[in-house]
Image: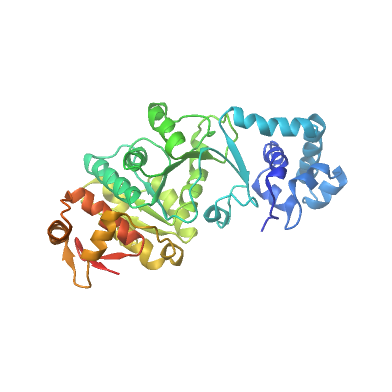
Amino acid sequence: MIHAIDSRVLPYAHWLYGIPGVGNASIRRLLGKDRSPLEIYRLSEEGLKSLLPPTARGEALAARIVSSRQKQGEDAVNRSYESLAGKGLHFLCLGHPDYPDRLAQIPDAPYGIYFRGRLPQQEKPAVAVIGARNCSEYGRHMAQWFGKELAAAGVEIISGMARGIDGIGQRAALAAGGYSLAVMGCGADICYPPENGQLYHALCEQGGVCSEYQPGTAPHSSLFPPRNRIISGLADAVVVIEAKDRSGTLITVDMALEQGREVFALPGRITEPLSEGCNRLLQQGASPALSPSEILRNLTGSSARSKQVRFPLGDVQIDLLQTLSTIPQSMEQIKEQVLLKYGRDLALPQLADQLVSLSLNGYARQIGNGYFIKS
């Protein structure tokens, strides 16, 4: 557990995080449970050595920290931090109250994160929607469906803005008026892949983009696997749409399981290579992703945190809630009843969105395939 800090100390946290060779493990050792980055900045070289392993590497790190401090006085440290705003970037570190709670709880949480836009809201449920870069038309359709329906119901969508499933699910979430966050395998100020430029800018405006890597860090294959722990770490559950056996997507799944996140996998044909990874996950005990409402029911049924998320109802939702009862009704029956009682002629997609939203927020439950009751 790292000592809680306020925003006045962020410039020194940014300085410490930016020293080459001083990684997450070294920072945790330096800070312990009761030291702040400002104290580390002002500590003598001997004091730094006493906090680091008594090895040649520990001595080298202490010397590197002192050298960085000599090159950057306190004014320079503050200017460097303030320069982030000119690049449209923000920085947070462990111990700051705005650092995401979910992420802080994973064993290897990044000490610092850079971001554009905004980070997920802790009080809202979040789901990672991930999958193959070279997806099928089926996978494309499913990613759009899950991204749209979950986001419309108030679930925040986390992904990696990669080609294929990731980007498709995130576009669908934004198109539904929802929130999505991209976790990058490069600096948060770099759009990768370049063809997702429009999505990148939309995320910065409507959602967010974040990275543990320093601004200006170019994308590299070695940077993507570590960032996957952040994708799963920011989510309550992970939904895998399509994945080949032994694909990179399954790295995220492994990390999600280590973090205690539930994993859902979309079933596919056993002859389809892009479904091999998902079918294997199902064989190993993952929950089947049969519909967005199944995910929502899981989030509302098993998460004590999400049960506390009770949003004010709009007029349409109030009418729907008055129509629902303890007897299961199909969407067609609900549509007919709302029209007869209240004169509202709801299109089925709109009705589905509203019912899913009610389910997510604990007012209703889905029973079977397309039947709803009042909670």
Q: Residue 133, image x and y in percent? A: 34, 38
Taking depth in this image into account, of 330 and 317 the one nearest to the observer is 317
To which quarter of the image does residue 369 belong? bottom left
Taking depth in this image into account, of 56 and 366 the one nearest to the observer is 366
Residue 24 showing in the rendered view: yes
Taking depth in this image into account, of 279 and 186 the one nearest to the observer is 186
Quadrant housing the C terminus: bottom left
Total count of labels = 0
What residue sits 80% from the left and 32% below the top?
73
What residue sits 85% from the left and 48% below the top?
47
Taking depth in this image into account, of 341 and 232 the one nearest to the observer is 341
Residue 285 showing in the rendered view: no
Describe residue 20's horizontal placement relative to residue 251 as left or right.
Answer: right
Describe residue 30's horizontal placement relative to residue 154 as left or right.
Answer: right
Quadrant housing the N terminus: bottom right
Q: Residue 140, image x and y in percent? A: 26, 41
**By what rule are the colours in the image chosen?**
rainbow
Q: Residue furthest front?
A: 342
What residue sits 17% from the left and 53% below the top?
344
Describe residue 82's horizontal placement relative to residue 70 as left or right.
Answer: left
Q: Residue 307, image x and y in percent? A: 41, 65
Q: Residue 24, image x and y in percent? A: 65, 47
What residue sits 34% from the left and 38% below the top?
171
Quick check: 169 above or below 268?
Answer: above
Describe residue 70's horizontal placement relative to residue 319 as left or right.
Answer: right
